[in-house]
Image (cartoon, helix red, strand yellow):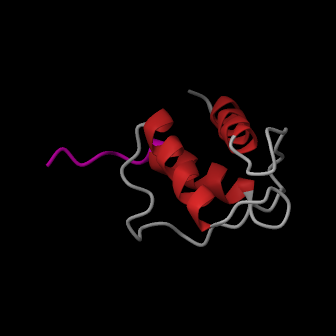
Amino acid sequence: MDSSTLRSNVRQIVGEMSPLGAREASSEDRLVEELGYDSLAVIELSLRIEQDFGLNAMSSGGTPDISTVKDIEDFVEAQVAAPTDAA
């Protein structure tokens, strides 16, 4: 999956799951202030992102500070590009 498609898919998921109702999310949108995410909604979002992109647990403390949709896009892109440990 190329970077543009990945980022578009992340924005679509974030917009669909917005607690304020489904909407089109942009990279600059802030999760809490503009999209209405609270701690529970962020956990639900992280589980959906993990499932859809085949990532290891995002909520296990290995995530950077995430406050915008772009932060999620950057994180997912880095995780997808990173080699997986076959341990």
Q: Residue at x 54, y 51 (%)?
A: 44
For residue 69, above or below residue 21: below
> Outermost residue, left direction?
87
Front residue of this view, candidates 59 and 53: 59
Q: Residue at x 84, y 39 (%)?
A: 23
Q: Which stretch is magenta? A: 80-87
**Quarter of the image where one finds residue 86:** top left
Q: Residue 48: image x %, image y %?
A: 52, 42
Q: Residue at x 38, y 65 (%)?
A: 60
Drawn side of residue 27 relative to residue 66, left or right: right
Residue 45 magenta-drawn?
no
For residue 35, above or below residue 50: below
Q: Residue 27: image x %, image y %?
A: 80, 50
Q: Residue at x 30, y 45 (%)?
A: 84
Front residue of this view, candidates 36 and 62: 36
Number of numbered discs overlaid on the protein picture? 0
Locate the N terminus and report the quarter of the image it occupies: top right
Front residue of this view, candidates 45 and 70: 45
**What secondary structure do most residues of the magenta stretch adopt?**
loop
Drawn side of residue 58 relative to residue 12, left or right: left
For residue 56, above or below residue 38: above
Residue 85 magenta-drawn?
yes
Q: Residue 29: image x %, image y %?
A: 83, 56
Front residue of this view, candidates 77 and 65: 65
